[in-house]
Image (spheres, rainbow, N blue to C red):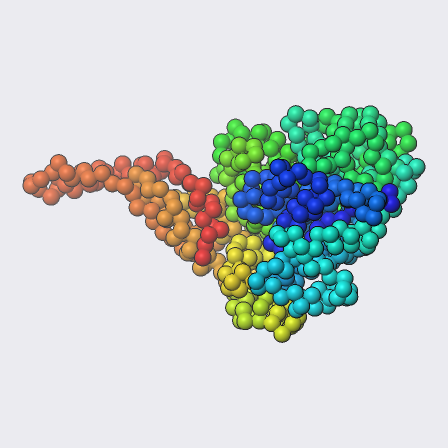
Amino acid sequence: MERIRNFCIIAHIDHGKSTLADRLLQHTGTVADRDMQEQLLDDMDLERERGITIKSHAIQMNYNYKGEEYVLNLIDTPGHVDFSYEVSRSIAACEGALLIVDASQGVEAQTISNLYLALEHDLEIIPVLNKIDLPGAMPEEMTDQVVELLGCDREDVILASGKAGIGIDEILEAIIEKIPAPQGDPEEPLQAMIFDSVFNSFRGIEVIFRVFNGSIKKGDKVKFVNTGKTYDADEIGILKLKQSPQQEIKAGNVGYLISGIKVAKEVKVGDTITHVDKPTQRMVKGFEDVKPMVFAGIYPVDTQDFEELRASMEKLQLNDASLVWEPETSAALGFGFRCGFLGMLHLEIVQERLEREFDMTVITTVPSVQFHAIMNDGEVRKINAPSEMPDSNKMAHMEEPIIRAQIISKAEYVGGIMGLCMDKRGILKNQVYLTSDRVELSFEIPLAEIVFDFFDKLKTISRGYASLDYELIGFRQSNLVKLDIQLNGDKVDALSAIVHRDKAYEWGKRLCEKLKELIPRQMFEIAVQASIGTKIIARETVKAMRKNVLAKCYGGDISRKRKLLEKQKKGKKRMRQVGNVEIPQEAFMAVLKLD
């Protein structure tokens, strides 16, 4: 056990975590040169296309240091704020972390929040300044920032470059010297924690775990404490580039377990694994449950695919533990699921993964956040969708979630960022100059305002420099109304939204204009209306397609033409009563693109 080191790599998005992980794997000879490719651990096509890490990946390396053979378990983590739950789970399985900072961009919001996550778990932090070979790198100034952030010595900061392979030896030395060996007793009853799982269509569910005490052997009878289910350990092993089966995994190590588990619900991330005959009395302290920030409905395009979609969601949830969902129904779209996501990027990725990995075509409704309705009798009702909102005469008031947003940016963009936040009903709470050129702004903003396009606009205003990190701080009373969209007098519940009263008119008007462009013309005219309660606040008309019935009338009396037009008018009216309007998928997404 003295020769095992468990560590993860944490950083802001795009600071070079995956590239550095590639170099470590190459340097320790874990990967043969012919198998080497960029971002080796990102095995999803989506991750490669977008150049971001979505899943954290565990892999084991062997390294020879001063004549001793060491085992290093590395976990590469995502950097985007939407996947911070992946990071918190990886951190729970480690004793140390490499904190990577880009030498040209410096400390950013996600760097700080990931650092705090690691410090909460008492991890040993090794600061690494990456990308020092870039022409724009400023190693001296950035080292000062890191020293200020961590309170370490300047000598502790390792200068490295993932691309050029500079400083890799120093990093490996620091991992062995500084990160403590895992604590644990191989003789105690087995106590292991599940920190990830993957669905394999041939072998059932593969569980990835970290052993804290005791050891697990092939063929053992094991029990998952939370669900109370027992299994045989058909195969256990360690995670190299490919899985490598072992006879036994001892305390302090990370491994996988395959026991032919078929039902996705039986595996819960954060659960404790122990032996059936000699169970441990100490549960592993799991992770706090994930708090979804954004809610949206996901519906199958064809209602018969509902069960198939449910199975796909269960398999996806194994791989992405931060996805929360429950069934719901909608008058316009039939049966589907109400899903909770950590942010808009998370929503986009889940939708794409459903389409790619499970061949499901889905419709996503307007994202919303969770509101609280305080009823007249003092009862608090949670509202995840506009359709659940009670009548205004039955409730005293509505409360909406407020977040504390920390934005770190260059000083020259402060004005634009403040303007954007004020526009989103934000209140400036604090402004700190970290250096002469970098400012940290703290705002309190309603979560509903940052759901749609806040992050994109922030990046535009600051030319990609600003970084955002946010946390929920509670609920506050607010003047909210439900905005309904009606087509031909029928409410379309999938297009409703809960908005602030001050913004309702403008929102309704823009939405009607957008829908007018997107709804295909029918043989009858369609009224697109936005309403609050019974009051119509905006209207657009999609004109009917008309056949020229006067083509055959030339000359003669006007009354003949009039008669034909009257006849056509009656037909249109009847069509409008029985006709229904098909809404294309783009129309549901239109609400997101309102500018």
Q: Specify the quadrant that holds the C terminus.
A: bottom left
Which residue extends farthest front?
A: 67
Task: Identify the residue shown where x is 54% and y is 71%.
Answer: 412
Rendered view: 373 above or below 302: below
Quarter of the image where one finds residue 587: top left
Rendered view: 532 above or below 219: below
Task: Identify the residue shown where x is 18% and y is 38%.
Answer: 549
Q: Is residue 491 visible?
A: no
Rendered view: 429 above or below 134: below
Relative to the observer, which residue lies in front, 229 or 99?
Answer: 99
Residue 4 pos. (x, y %): 82, 44
Q: Specify the quadrant that holds the N terminus.
A: top right
Residue 523 pos. (x, y %): 30, 38
Which residue extends farthest right?
A: 187
Q: Is residue 7 visible?
A: yes
Task: Identify the residue shown where x is 7% and y is 41%.
Answer: 555
Relative to the observer, which residue lies in front, 544 or 322?
Answer: 322
Residue 317 pos. (x, y %): 65, 38
Quarter of the image where one finds residue 70: top right
